[in-house]
Image (spheres, grey):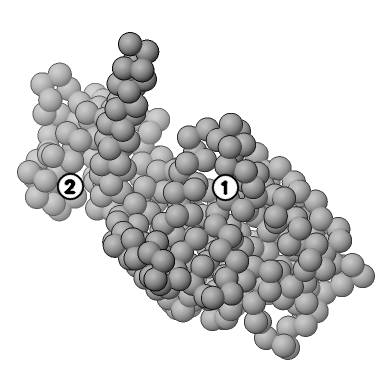
Amino acid sequence: MEKTKELDAFRKQIETIATHGVLSMSIALGLKLKLFDALAKVASEEEPKSARDVADAAGMKERYVQEWLNTMACASIIEMTESGDRYWIPKERINDLSSSHSHAMVAHQLFLPIFGRVFDQICQVFEKNGPLGMEYESYTDFYRVMDEVSHAKHKAKLISDFLPLTGLTDKLKSGAAVLDVGCGSGFHIFHLAEHFPNSNFTGVDVSLDAVMSARQTLSGERKDLHNAAFIHSDAGGMSEEWTEKFDWVTIFDACHDQQRPDLALKEVHRVLKPGGVFTMLEINGTSNPHTDRQEIGLLSAYLYGLSLFHCLPVGSNSKDALCLGTMWGTKRATEMLKSAGFTDIQVVPTPFFAVNVLYLCKKAM
């Protein structure tokens, strides 16, 4: 009897996982098509609106919008009337679900369609005689979504909470040379460059698509910034002219994506000025999945899953790759930093950035 109950519970768990998978894709659909925005614009608890009203506001077909609304309402993501034909978003949820100010974990739903597109290729890299990994460019829209996640996760706390941990605020105000390794589409560069006009900010990324996106933004909506630049470069082989050039080098959630993070960290050490600061924000893994599950619960499975579908494949795509994955952990990260030449290494908690930890390093004088 006990075994039967355990099996029933397991089957219910699988059912819940399947349900949540569909819901995640449906939330992503609502974000991309701005359906949440349309619903928030026209409806409220006092005046719930029909699928036709929402469809008209979004410029979409009513029948599809109705099915989406029903999906969201049955999941209690939004609310509906007892008649089942009028809908609204509770006021306290509107900001989290908006396309421009979504909560980081809401924005994370946008990764699921991307992973779906590479599903068959991931199957191939599993095979013994299959490809070693994946090219960055295989992940269409990944850097745009990562930019949205960074915006949702970091914008409110980057200057007020994160920066004071580095001890660099005054230096940035007076003028510093800053390098962001794995800059993606440039969110952190743009945000910092806006706040510190006397400093110069350079971003490097191995993805040409990401760099081109950042440059397009710089020449368009952020053409007011004259202290930012973006360069297509492998972090493991940066310009020889950069030796001891930068006051601050930073990596935001990107070291584990490197195929040779050991070489990238040695390059970081080389390009830092003596006394310069290196900050590396990474996932706070323990290097032990059993401990990860104990400490952060089901979220650990999500983080290993992100690694499975993106971070591990792009970080494994060469014969000499170290194949780290997202959850490489503090033990291995600290060892690699020491091997890169850093002796002053602090592991600093970042409660304002959930699941992250900061490695704060200073280069010897």
Q: Earlier in the sequence, mark 1 or mark 2?
A: 2
Position above or below: 357 against 80: below
Q: Residue most toward the bottom?
A: 241
Q: Nearer the viewer, mark 1 or mark 2?
A: 1
91 sits left or right of 245 in the view? left
Give the residue at x 15% y 53%: 59
Q: Which residue is mark 2?
A: 57
Position above or below: 129 against 100: below
Q: At which x and y percent is residue 62? A: 8, 45
Residue placed most toward the observer, 272 or 237: 237
Give the residue at x 34% y 26%: 10
The image quadrant of residue 309 is bottom left
Q: Which residue is mark 1?
A: 156
Q: Is residue 199 at least partly visible in the picture?
A: no
Position above or below: 267 against 298: below
Q: At which x and y percent is residue 274? A: 87, 72
Tag 1: amino acid: Ala
Q: Is residue 46 at least partly visible in the picture?
A: yes
Secondary-structure class at tag 2: helix
Residue placed most toward the observer, 50 or 297: 297
Q: Mark 1 and mark 2 in contact? Answer it, CB < 8 Å.
A: no
Q: At which x and y percent is residue 43? A: 23, 34
269 sits left or right of 112 in the view? right
Give the residue at x 72% y 76%: 267
Secondary-structure class at tag 1: helix
Disc 1 to disc 2, C-alpha distance: 30 Å
Q: Residues within 10 Å of mark 2 (few under 14, many from 20)?
A: some
Position above or below: 272 against 163: below
Q: Quadrant of the N terminus?
A: top left
Residue placed most toward the observer, 157 or 131: 131
